[in-house]
């Protein structure tokens, strides 16, 4: 039998995600992404990372990204052990 991974939120726990954007998100918008860490990388990208309650919340975050007009590079579900943030980034306090 093959092992199947449960989707985010399936057991009452939020999934952890990294949302990578082209461009640096201005600090004034960090409050819009409450609960997520905002990291600016030296390559000119921004990574939003942290827990996301469920798929509806993930879609809500993606709508906010769209509304800001920053190009979306990737959305990745990560294990909690991998969710420390990209190397070489500067974290904005929340």
Image (tube, grey):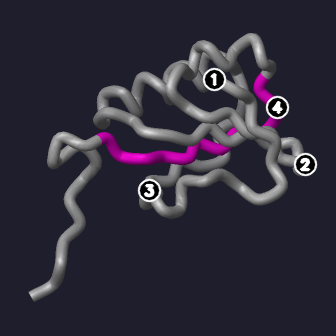
Identify which residue, 36 or 69, lies in the foreground. 36
Seen at 44% across and 53% down, the residue is 77
User: Secondary structure beneath disc 4?
Assistant: loop
Disc on res. 94 = 1
Q: Is residue 81 left or right of residue 29?
A: left
Query: Residue 38, located in which quarter of the rendered image?
Result: top right
Cα separation between marks 1 and 3: 19 Å
Query: Residue 67, located in which quarter of the rendered image?
Result: top right
Q: Tell me the mark number nearer the camera, choosing from 2 and 1.
A: 1
Q: Tell me the mark number nearer the camera, choosing from 1 and 4.
A: 1
Quadrant (top left/top right/bottom left/bottom right) for the N terminus: bottom left
Query: Residue 60, located in which quarter of the rendered image?
Result: top left
Tell me which label, 1 or 3, sits earlier in the chain.
3
Quadrant (top left/top right/bottom left/bottom right) for the C terminus: top right
Q: Name the residue under label 3.
A: 80
Residue 54 magenta-highlighted: no
* On screen, residue 7 above or below 51: below
Tell me which label, 3 or 2, sits earlier in the chain.
2
Residue 28 drawn at (x, y percent) = 75, 11
Which region shows up in magenta?
Answer: 14-25
Seen at 58% across and 14% down, the residue is 32
Seen at 48% across and 26% down, the residue is 61
Cα separation between marks 2 and 4: 10 Å
Tell me which label, 2 or 4, sits earlier in the chain.
4
**C-beta proximity under 8 Å, tags 1 and 4:** no
Cα separation between marks 3 and 4: 24 Å
Q: Name the residue under label 4.
A: 24
* Residue lying farthest to the front in this orientation: 93
């Amino acid at each position: 039998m093959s092992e199947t991974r449960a989707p985010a939120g399936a057991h009452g726990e939020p999934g952890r995600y990294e949302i990578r954007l082209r461009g640096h998100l201005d600090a004034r918008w960090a409050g819009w992404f409450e609960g997520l860490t905002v990291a600016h990388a030296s390559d000119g990208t921004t990574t939003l990372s942290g827990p996301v309650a469920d798929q509806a919340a993930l879609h809500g975050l993606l709508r906010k990204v769209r509304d800001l007009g920053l190009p979306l590079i990737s959305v990745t579900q990560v294990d909690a052990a991998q969710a420390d943030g990209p190397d070489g980034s500067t974290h904005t306090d929340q």
